[in-house]
Amino acid sequence: MKPSSLYIHIPFCASKCYYCDFNSYVSTGEVMDRYLDGLEKEMELLSKELPWEPLKTVFFGGGTPTMFDVKQTERMMNILNRFFRLAEGAEISVEANPGTVNLEKLRVLKEGGANRLSFGVQSFHDPILKKLGRLHDSLTVYHSYEKARQAGFSSINLDLMFGLPGQTIPIFEDSLRRIVELQPEHISAYSLKVEEGTPFAIWQERGKLQLPPEEEDLAMYQLLMDTLEAHGYQMYEISNFAKKDHDCRHNQVYWRNEPYLAAGAGAHGYVNDVRYVIQSSVPGYIETCLSGKRPVVEREEIPAEIQREDTMILGLRMIRGVEHARFKERHGVDMHNVFGREIERFVQEGLLTDNAEAVCLTKKALPIANEVFSGFLIS
Ligand code: SF4
């Protein structure tokens, strides 16, 4: 199966959020220019060295791709269009942070083919945004969102977080009310996970990070699902909600365990059953690309049994679950022949349903989905 999806990593941010372990750096305009030189070379090599089909989805993630100025943004879009052919109706998403966009930049993105924007809002409560180390405030969210609509974006995602320091249920409820009022086409909402090596991890170790108790975290998740459902959003993945026809097609490629190309410092790709990792240091990345080599630092062939586990673990994140026919087509074997025992156990526990079409998580399983996923690690 040839990939028809491409992830492009832009590793720059205006500052580093206290909970973030993504590959992102605070940098200068000059380094960003050189990064684009490197990316241009990498994309050329990638388009020649790996198999691909006209791209159906592209995702510029980060970092903050909208850290580029107008000229750099134009160049970023040109690099994509120069080396890759896009399929008719391709979904081209760009991650953005409130406060890093203006009308001109958004128009350049739109003219370059971007048709979906994803804003990292996280909360509408300014004291919480400060505690996260975010630079924007809630007013900036409204301004940036309005500009995106003015520029003609008709598919916008807003990211929210819950389980945050200082966040109570009424505070989260207020953020939910405000996000729903804006009527974005898509909402992603994640519970905070304290990642190793971040300031939050250090503060937690020192007893200086007060997070809501687990019951409150679960109550926020339930509130999220109930509120968004009541406002016409369909939950199609455990953390993702969309209006009709606005499911993120790019992310579904990951959840279906399908191949995808990746470019940019620290990105991961998956082609011909091999997962590859790109050099994460920005200077190293630029140097390798400009020397005419693809900056891949790791390649791992994924054995068939791990691929099957991945298909279950990733696929069960989607509310439609893992389809029997798709599993058989992908792996050449019946899902029951590999995971019959696990499926039966979780069905008996009321955590999975198994019908002629697919195996899916039940509502009861949603808050404890990780327990179900780990049950499919059998090799
Ligand atoms: S804006 Fe996003 S990528 Fe950048 S530091 Fe914050 S969480 Fe990380």
Image (tube, rainbow, N blue to C red):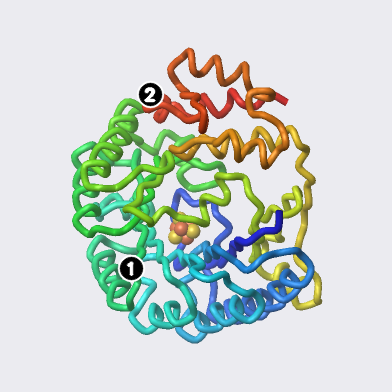
At x 78%, y 52%, the residue is 299
Front position in the image: 349 or 145: 349
Q: Secondary structure at mark 2?
A: helix
> Along the line of sight, which residue is nearer the eye, 76 or 274?
274
Residue 16 visible? The answer is no
Asked if disc 2 is less than 8 Å from ligand 1, the answer is no
Mark 2 — residue? 364
Total number of numbered discs in the rendering: 2
Q: Position of residue 230 (x, y in %)?
A: 21, 42
- At label 1, which amino acid type do we have? Ser
Q: Position of residue 48 (x, y in %)?
A: 77, 72
Nearest the viewer among 155 and 159 is: 155
- Residue in view at x 32 percent, y 63 percent: 136
Q: Quadrant of residue 182?
A: bottom left
Mark 1 highlights which residue?
154
Quarter of the figure that contains the C terminus: top right
Q: Is residue 135 left or right of residue 323?
A: left
Residue at left offset 76%, top offset 52%:
272
Q: Residue at x 29, y 33 (%)?
A: 222
| Mark 1 in CB contact with mark 2 (< 8 angstroms) | no
In this rendering, is residue 18 above or below 116? Answer: above
Residues under labels 1 and 2: Cα distance? 34 Å
Rendered location of residue 125, percent (x, y): 24, 52
Drawn side of residue 58 relative to residue 339, left or right: left
Closer to us: 134 or 217: 217
Q: If you read the primary sequence from the N terminus, does the residue marked by circle 1 or circle 2 appear first?
A: 1
Position of 74 relative to 51 (above/below)? below
Q: Position of residue 355 (x, y in %)?
A: 49, 26
Q: Residues within 10 Å of mark 1 (few under 14, many from 20)?
A: some
Whether residue 250 can be seen here: yes
Residue at disc 1, secondary structure: loop
The reply, left or right, for residue 315 in relation to residue 126 is: right
